[in-house]
Amino acid sequence: MIDRSVLGGISAFANLPDDQLEWFLSHAEEIHVEAGEPFVRRGDPPAWLFVFLEGQFQWRGEFGGDTVVMPASAGEVEGVYPFSRMREFTVAGIALTRARLLRFPVSMYSELIPKMPEFTARLVAMMSDRIREGTRIEQQKDRLFSLGRLSAGLAHELNNPAAAATRAASQLKEHLDRLKFASFALGRCTLSEEQRLELVHFEKQLEPGCDPDPLALGDLEDQIASVLQLAGEHETWQSSSALARCQVQPEALRSILLKLDPGAVHAAVMRLAASAELAVLSRAIVTSTARISELVGAVKEYTYLDQAPVQDIDIARSLESTLAMFDHKVREGITVIRDYQPVPLLVNSFGSQLNQVWTNLILNAIEAMAGKGELRLRTLRQGEMVIVEIGDNGPGIPAEIRSHIFEPFFTTKGIGEGTGLGLDTALRIVRNHQGEIHVESCPGDTRFQVWLPLVAEDVGVS
């Protein structure tokens, strides 16, 4: 039998009375395992507390869709702690070297707790530390999961304008060369001062339209092509397309071309078409880079980068900066209905924390509707509180799980699709702001209401 001094050298048993150590040893079983041999398997009932005496150990299994590997060494006490709600071992315990350990039956806890109260308290403290560490890891995973979704959406949003700007910039040189050649050709033609001024004036008015109707644009191209053919041009498709995108009116173009000598018409059309192409490309670059700048600004506002960590936050603006992060999801089939109070409602807060709350609630609503439906955002004032309501017309939350949705790790999503910490995190943040979250749900109408205290300056006298 193991001498009680061996237990006394383990921190969990340090300074315990000898009779308690003797009692524990009398009910524990010493086992020996070879390297690579399991001492408990995943799925085994939660029947044992283990005291590692010699060797190196490892816990292996899956948690939240990820493979988990946790090392353990001699002197540690692991397994099922008192008051644990464990239903089965979710990981397997394996000896990495030849090892020796004690296993104490959980069925004896009813006697251990009154017999060894100090040891019991230490085991409960270990369990609390384990829960805190597990929660910390999962919260970090949840933040990374959310960051991954945000990053994917932002990359998608940035890629489109960046690609458009790149395409436009790559075509600039080609059309600049055409403009130079057309200008040289036009310079060799005999034109009156009046004709030159009229061409310059016409060229200055070349400005791309704002997303014209494709059918209307096609009709305009055909009309311009007819004008160019009557003026003696043969290959008209490229010129007519560029001029149509700048909303050139066929009658105005016909008027200016009729005033030119036949030899100058081709050079004039080349120059006007090149100028139109450059105007279209310039607009594309300006629009694309402006969109990129807008997205960067939205990210800075969402994260409160370069701003004080704690400040008075305009709730409606905070919601909008969060919504901007999911513009790609909203555009695909979500109708956003806003009902904001006209007067700004201010909350003293870590702004990025509140945005994390809105992120979780908005994403949940979008996913509940499978990407198609109505997302309803509403703000109102109730005494000294602001109520932020985020709703959707999805299928609703079943009554049988409604009381569990704020519990840590509770999720209805598949493995790898969620951590079950989104609503738990949102609730903790709101409560840290002295607020609360309420939920009402039925098929076609789910509403999460976030109650937060208004800043003192915004509170009127009743």
Image: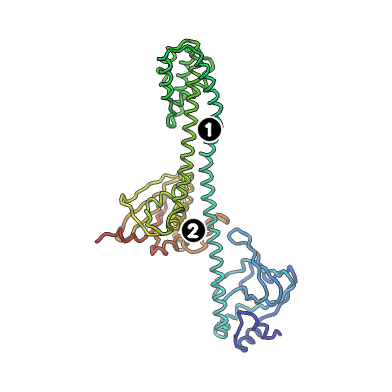
Q: Is residue 100 above or below residue 455?
A: below
Of 200 and 443, the residue lying toward us: 200
Q: Is residue 271 left or right of residue 50?
A: left
On residue 422, which mark appears?
2
Residue 171, percent from left and from top: 55, 30
Of 181 and 46, the residue lying toward us: 181
Could you tell me if residue 113 is visible in this image? yes
Residue at the (41%, 47%) spot, across then down: 374
Q: How many marks?
A: 2
Residue at the (54%, 41%) spot, across then down: 159
Q: Amino acid at mark 1?
A: Ala
Q: Is residue 213 left or right of residue 91?
A: left
Of 260 and 444, the residue lying toward us: 260
- The quadrant in which the N terminus is found is bottom right
Q: Is residue 149 left or right of residue 31?
A: left
Residue 93, percent from left and from top: 67, 69
Residue under label 1, please give it: 168
In three-dimensional space, the C-alpha distance between marks 1 and 2, rounded to whole angstroms, equals 41 Å
